[in-house]
Image (cartoon, rainbow, N blue to C red):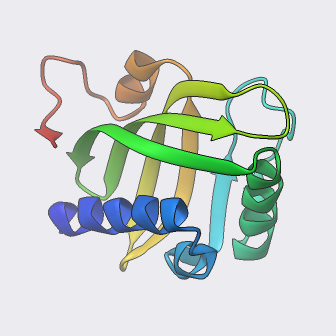
Amino acid sequence: MSQDNVDIIRSAIASWNAGNMDAVREGLDPNVVATPLQGWPEQGPFVGRDAVMAWYGQVREAWDIDTVEAIRFVEAGDRVLVRVRWHGAGQGPESTMEFTAVYTMRKGGTVYIEFFWDHAEALQALGLSEQDAHVDT
């Protein structure tokens, strides 16, 4: 099932980049919980599909265009770790940031999303290190 989960997250990233937020929404469990990056302006956690989508909407409004590039996927059972590079442009200075997201999956939907600035910390949250992390690119 874990490769299926990786494919679900790949699809969600492609939907985000295409601006298809309805598809992003459909990939979230109705009771999803998302915790933002430490120090992020909106503190969270965001509980429920509507709250997470409202937060995503706020984030997207900061730029005229934004894209997410997946740098690395690590599958770990019902969780998928993704190191990403997020680029936003327009409405002020351009911004590029790297962070890691850990998605916990149930029955084909995302039930928990946790964001980390530090990739090693995200791996540690999964009980993994760089040496024993299975990489799926």
**In the rendered image of this protein, does residue 22 appear above or below residue 119?**
below
The residue shown at (44%, 53%) is 103
Give the x, y percent position of residue 91. 84, 39
| In the foreground, 22 or 3 | 22
The residue shown at (34%, 52%) is 79
The residue shown at (36%, 42%) is 70
* Residue 70 appears left or right of 68: left
Give the x, y percent position of residue 129. 24, 19
* Residue 65 appears left or right of 4: right
Give the x, y percent position of residue 43. 84, 38
The residue shown at (49%, 18%) is 118
Quarter of the figure with the N terminus: bottom left
**In the rendered image of this protein, does residue 82 appear above or below residue 112?**
above
| In the foreground, 77 or 69 | 69
**In the rendered image of this protein, does residue 13 appear above or below residue 29?**
above
* Residue 14 appears left or right of 51: left
